[in-house]
Image: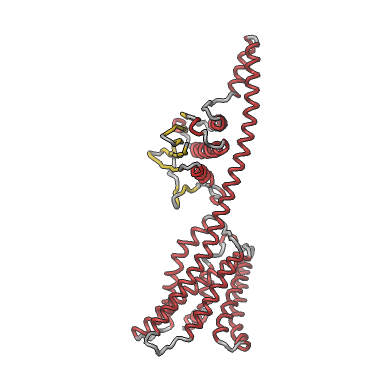
Amino acid sequence: MLILEFLIRWQIEAGMLGAACLFVPWNRRRKRFFPRAALGLALLLVLTYWAPDLLDGMWRSSLLLYVLSLLLDTALLVLLIWGCFDCTLVHAVFSATCAYAVQHMTSKLAYMGAFSLMYRGGATLQSWHFLALLLLANALVCVPIFFGFTRRFFKAGELMFDRAKTVGYSGAFLFVAVYLSALLEQNLDTSSPTYLTSYLALNAFCILFAGAVLSMEFSNCSIKRLESEKMILEQMLENDRQQYEQAKREMEKINIRYHDLKQQYSRAPDEERAKLEREMEAIRLRYYTGNKALDIVLTQKSGFCEKEGIHLVCSVDGSCLSGMTHYHIYSMLGNAIDNAIECLAKVEDREKKVINLSICRRADMAVICVENYTPVLPVVRHGALVTTKQDAASHGYGTKSIKNIAELYGGTADYFVEEEVFCLLITIRC
């Protein structure tokens, strides 16, 4: 019974601590985490135990006392998270605010169930009945939040926040709503026949509002992640543009050297021609597709293919891509062929180490197809390919970049696997 009474007495603090586990960065614990956590929990329990008596002497309003106690609990939880995890203060406020929103939702849901049983069924609830309702409410709220929000966001890497003000505003809105709902609940007429309906409606509104605040907090992270992803893709494209300009300059130097060698070859004696032929073969431009950027990227990537023992088979009409910016061609096809090379580099069967590239015109669309054998089926999540590299947060942008460039030219980038052959199909409006 003592344990039950303790849990009921500390239900708000226990609920907030439990809910905070959904939002803290567990992979970024500070050194001496357990001593820090123990000290922080002890401080939180001591202060929250003595604070009501201290505040009661300063404030006569029980409602104001309740709200101030919640603010103190949240502030202490912020300090506990900040002291135990290597995160920003904004992240700690985010975690504490979300934890309180979840606790508020579970508490209101449990009280709705308890009041419904008492008023409609006439039942007398024991402490363990209410504790069971709290546990059930936590399961109904926390499990969907974990799988729908927390797991998805934290798997993608560290949380990023659009603006610190948004986190602060969310918390402020939540506490104002709690105060107003408690004020309304305090003034409900318990003798009215509509009391139960009014009570349930008010608590349902509180749950919806807390859920809306929680969604706003995560939307803040989602918007920032999209902006960050956009910046990364733009930086990648800029890097590809610089690489293309460098490759173009190097190719021009090679072409000049190749023509010089041709002149030397025409005047060289027979015994020197074999040496000049070998040098010309080594540096000559290997592809003439009708598109300079395409010639450069294919020549460059074919060299990488040779190093990995991969055969690059091309059937391309470069004129189909004449409407594209050169560095967009270099970036899009470079990423596509790089992905195929990376996949085939792990394959030991030389007969399967082949990349087939075709570019042709279909009506007013250019159709680009890159095919290669894949020993493992690609992982798809939320309609997008998932990188197989360990540092998933820093990789996987190549396919996104391809898709963005295709969409920029009114096309699409799709993929499918058929009989262990991975096919990337890109369409570009001519």
Please give the name of the residue rendered at 48% of the width and 86% of the height, measured from the top-left corner.
187
Determine whether 308 is above or below 36 in the image: above
Counting the numbered discs, the total is 0
Which residue in the rendered view is the most extreme toward the top? 269
Residue 262 quadrant: top right
Instruction: Give the image location of residue 242, x and y in percent.
Output: 63, 39
Q: Position of residue 370 (x, y in %)?
A: 46, 36
Q: Is residue 313 visible?
A: no
Residue nearer the viewer, 116 or 9:
116
Q: Nearer the viewer, residue 224 or 366?
A: 366
Q: Nearer the viewer, residue 70 or 161?
A: 161
Q: Residue 226 placed where, x, y %?
A: 54, 54
Residue with the most extreme left position: 121
Residue 265 visible at all: yes
Q: Position of residue 394 (x, y in %)?
A: 57, 49
The quadrant holding residue 166 is: bottom right
Looking at the picture, tell me which residue is in the foreground, 380 or 255. Answer: 255
Q: Residue at x 42, y 88 (%)?
A: 190
How does the figure colour the protein chain or chains?
Answer: secondary structure
Q: Residue at x 44, y 43 (%)?
A: 414
